[in-house]
Image: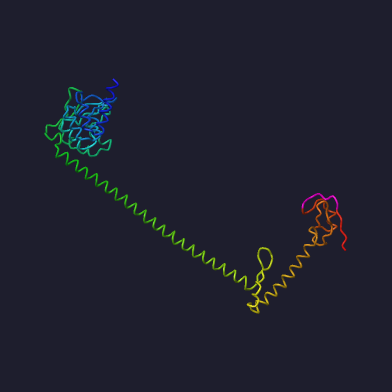
Amino acid sequence: MAEARDDNATLAEACARGDTGAVSALISGRDVNAGLDGDMNTALHYASNYGHETLTRLLLDAGADPNVRTQLLQTPLMLADSPAVAALLLRRAADPFLCSLRGLDALGCAKQSGRLGVAAVLEKVKRNRTGPQNDTTTGDTRTTSTSSSYFPDEADSSASSSDYDRQEARGRGEEWVKVLRELETEKRRRREAEGEAGRLGERVAQLELERLRLLQRGAQAASCGSPSRGDGGGGMELPRQGCLGSMTSEALRELDARLTSYQADVRAALMDTSRCIVCREAEQSAILLPCKHQVLCGACAERVETCPLCRASISERFTPFKS
């Protein structure tokens, strides 16, 4: 039994590949209509389903039944994957009006699975049928044709296949044209975006160069031009040594006025730093222990319990004598 299953699997694989030499050797001396798998698909089902016309002809010549059924009542014609295979089965008396277990004939199966070329061949058969006739062997109701064109000849099947192939190729061509147009549009947008990015990059570089030039000019003006009061630390930037001779009279007078004002500010600041940080009026005189900070006057020192600078507890206060 195991050997028989292996032979069936080997034959099924050879039929799927379309290997006519291997299939010829494997069907020699065996029933060509025997099922090869659990669904009872025969070698002809496999050859038809994979669209191998040459192998389909070889199996039919070897005695394969074109109307053999699987467990799902599917015939090889219901599984045909190419118009040429479908036409060959029809010429060998395959019945297109038998129905599967799901109630679909060969045309219905082809349409459901999207095999439009096969459907085109079967449509012609459908147009040629004349009337129903009962099948006494299976009980199926099928339709036969009294016309010899019931099964399409090779020229008709080739024409149908060629027409379908042309339509299919035209459809694929239109799809490719659409895809190519979309690609070109996307490339054009990308090029435009890259060009815009390049222009923005150039503009940023130009602005950076301009900023550097302005900084350089500002540094030169600060070193040899009019003095200016610093913004951050409250100090004053003075001209470098040797630059006074290049300054105008007006600039020198302005510098002198600024220096005088700055000197007054310095003196006021010095006086302010010696005043009590609490009352801001009396001079700092008391020393606080144990932190040793001298930031309060004697009166304010008596009123506080902690140092206003370090927040340490005050244990003692004293006022040093000035010499």
Which residue sits furthest bottom?
A: 249
Question: Most extreme residue toward the top, as rendered?
Answer: 1
Q: Quadrant of residue 54?
A: top left
> Number of marks in the image?
0
Q: Residue at x 41, y 57 (%)?
A: 194
The residue closer to the viewer here, 156 or 228, is 228
Render colour scheme: rainbow
The residue lying at 28 percent from left, 22 percent from top is 3
Image quarter (top left, top right, bottom left or bottom right) of the C terminus? bottom right
Indicate the position of residue 87 as horizontal and vertical percent values. 18, 35
Front in this rendered view, residue 75 or 45: 45
The answer to whether residue 303 is left or right of residue 207 is right
The location of residue 172, given as percent across then percent down, is: 27, 46
- Start and end of the magenta stretch? 310-316
Residue at 18% x, 24% y: name it: 135
Please say whether residue 314 is one of the residues in the magenta stretch. yes
The residue lying toward the viewer, choosing from 140 and 187, is: 187
Vertical comparison of 204 with 179: above or below: below
x, y percent for residue 296: 82, 57
